[in-house]
Image (tube, rainbow, N blue to C red):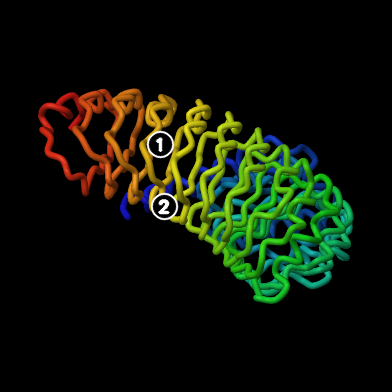
Amino acid sequence: MEGRSMVLRQLSSAVLFYTFFYMNQLNLVPTPMAGAVSVTNETDYQALLEIKKAIWTDPFGVFNSWNASIHFCNWAGLFISTNHLEGSIPAELGHIRLEMLQLSLNRLSGEIPFSLYNITSISLFSVAFNQLRGQLPSDIGLTLPKLEGFFAGGNQLSGPIPASLANASGLIQIDISQNAITGPLPLNLGNLEQLPLLHFGGNPVGTGKGDVDFISSLSNCSSLRILWLPQDQLKGVLPGSIANLSSNLLLFRLDGNYLSGNIPQGIENLVNLELLALYSNEITGSIPDSIGQLSRLQVFIMADNKFSGKIPSSIGNMTLLSRLILEANMLEQAIPSSVGNCTVLQELILSTNRLVGKIPEGVIGLSSLSLGLGLARNNLTGPLPPQVGNLENLILLDISESKLSGEIPNTLGRCLQLQSLNLAGWQVIFSLEKYLHPLKT
């Protein structure tokens, strides 16, 4: 269980890395831009002074220059994200003719003033990663008609997702993740055909009725590249319409929900997919052979489901795979030797299944493996192949509770980077001094 917890922590880090990497690649992370604030009159000047009054902690001295000795157009920090500011957002901020509001990555608290939702000129609204609470107004898509990017993740917001967001026809980036937002998910968001990023993860939006209909509605979003819906308490059968999602889709997460059914036919239509994470659901059936047609897939995580049948040999066609996580299912038969074709694989976790047969030499000898190799709690037989010595950069090796026999190969001593080694349950006698002497202590 300790090894499994470590793997799951690593998975969380992996998907977080992919989120930020691709958001940057797609220019989806707000960045400082000149002209973000339009300030031209006394009203704007007074509103900025109110902002300064509302902040009670300013560790970086952002507001030191906010005084009469400098024209307020030249005040520092008009782009005031990532400054550890504490306090509330003053309502007077809504009196400034803003095009971009970037207050993310601070420690702001309280509710978002409704005056901010009336800045009709605003295109970027970012208040992510603060301590803000309250609800989003139901007419937000009408009062912010020029809105292109809305980032409010990592706060304490509650209430439903406003269906009016679909009225902001230029909206291309929505991230309301990690709040206490409730469902249902509005079906009309599928009308935002140019939407590349949709991130609602970490909200209790599932209602148990029609949860997956929202996914079907997104088939119109031809530009969708990131669909992030983990830990949303979604219930229902995986819809076949997943196969109709945009072929431009790169990252797809539905993990940590209560979804059932089989992997839909046509999943191979998502030809550009690089990350597919459906772990921690109740999905049944087999992993289809057609999955091997996703030749660009780099991360494939299906752990903690109820998959049965064999591991398809077509996985060997995914030569860009870096992580293959299929643990805690009911997979049977032998480990396909074709997995050895995945020559950039860094992590392979197949523990807690019903796999049988010998460990393929080409798999145990994958020198690219570094993060982890988990084959524990299966029915694997035969000796541990000496090719295990190729894993010179491996950190975690768990082959416990299996039916392997024979001596531990002394080549294991070449695995100098091992930090976690679990051989529990082996019915063999071996000398640690003989076989593990080269290992670091």
Q: Residue at x 66, y 63 (%)?
A: 89
State the residue position of label 1: 371
Q: Measured along the vertical axis of the image, is residue 387 above or below residue 327?
A: above
Viewer can see residue 430 = yes
Q: Quadrant of the N terminus?
A: bottom left
Where disc 2 sits, the SS reads loop
Report the front residue among 190 and 156. Answer: 190
Q: Quadrant of the C terminus?
A: top left
Q: Measured along the vertical axis of the image, is residue 9 above or below residue 299?
A: below
Q: Residue at x 69, y 41 (%)?
A: 250
Q: Measured along the vertical axis of the image, is residue 137 above or below residue 253?
A: below
Q: Residue at x 28, y 33 (%)?
A: 384
Where disc 1 sits, the SS reads loop
Q: Which of labels 2 and 1 is toward the front?
A: 2
Are there few (<14), some (14-19), or many (20+) residues within 10 Å of tag 1? many
State the residue position of label 2: 353
Q: Residue at x 43, y 45 (%)?
A: 350
* Alpha carbon distance from label 2 to label 1: 20 Å
Report the front residue among 204 and 267. Answer: 267
- Residue 120, position in %: x, y? 87, 59
